[in-house]
Amino acid sequence: MSNKIRVAILGATGAVGTEIIDILASRKFPVSDLKLLASPRSAGKSLDFQGEKIKIEAVNDSSFQDVDLVLASAGGSTSKKWVKNIVESGAVMVDNSSAFRMNPQVPLIVPEINPEAAANHPGVIANPNCTTILMGVAIYPLHQVQPIKRVVV
């Protein structure tokens, strides 16, 4: 069995999507196949991943077949539209939108704080917004020493 992961990026042409592509490459994430998914207006264009041009596909009902991990950063309405399809295909979606952050069934994960919570997911993992993640990473060590009950920002 291979330890490589079949990855799809939902929202690949956006600012966060293109950054995800760069981070996967720079961290040598074990990608076996990479699907770049976006709106129909971006379909047919290509983006570079590790020296290879990968064609952008318009997301559709069959986009998530043969995918293990979907990194979604295309906005809350897009995440909500495709979540059922993603989960039913057997993939896990890590959602970067606000769509599932307040859903009590979906773990809200910051890897530096609560990575163990990702083990109990319903096929979807959420993350807080970017400023909350950074604040949490800074505050968590203090919280471990003296529990913090409230933060006013």
Image: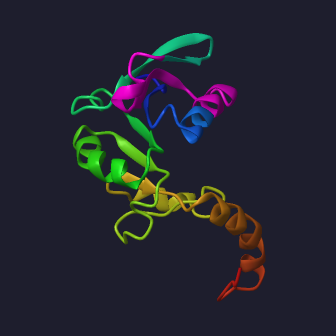
Residue 146 magenta-highlighted: no
- Residue 38: where, in percent of width, then height? 40, 32
Residue at (45, 65) in percent of width and height? 101
Left or right relative to 85: residue 147: right
Q: Quadrant of residue 115?
A: bottom right
> For residue 6, which quarter of the picture?
top left
The N terminus appears in which quarter of the rendering?
Answer: top left
Q: In which quarter of the image is the C terminus?
A: bottom right
Q: Is residue 66 left or right of residue 4?
A: left
The range drawn in magenta is: 21-45
The x and y percentages for residue 74 are 44, 44
Towards the viewer: 29 or 151: 151
* Rendered residue at 37%/72% (across/down): 104
Whether residue 8 appears in this view of the structure is yes
User: Is residue 35 part of the magenta span, yes or no?
Assistant: yes
Query: For this view, does 125 lie left or right of residue 80?
Result: right
| Rendered view: 10 above or below 87 | above
Whether 153 is drawn above or below 138: the answer is below
The outermost residue toward the front is 41
- In the rendered image, residue 46, in percent from the top left (x then y), is placed at 49, 16
Q: For this rendering, which residue is in front, 149 or 73?
A: 73
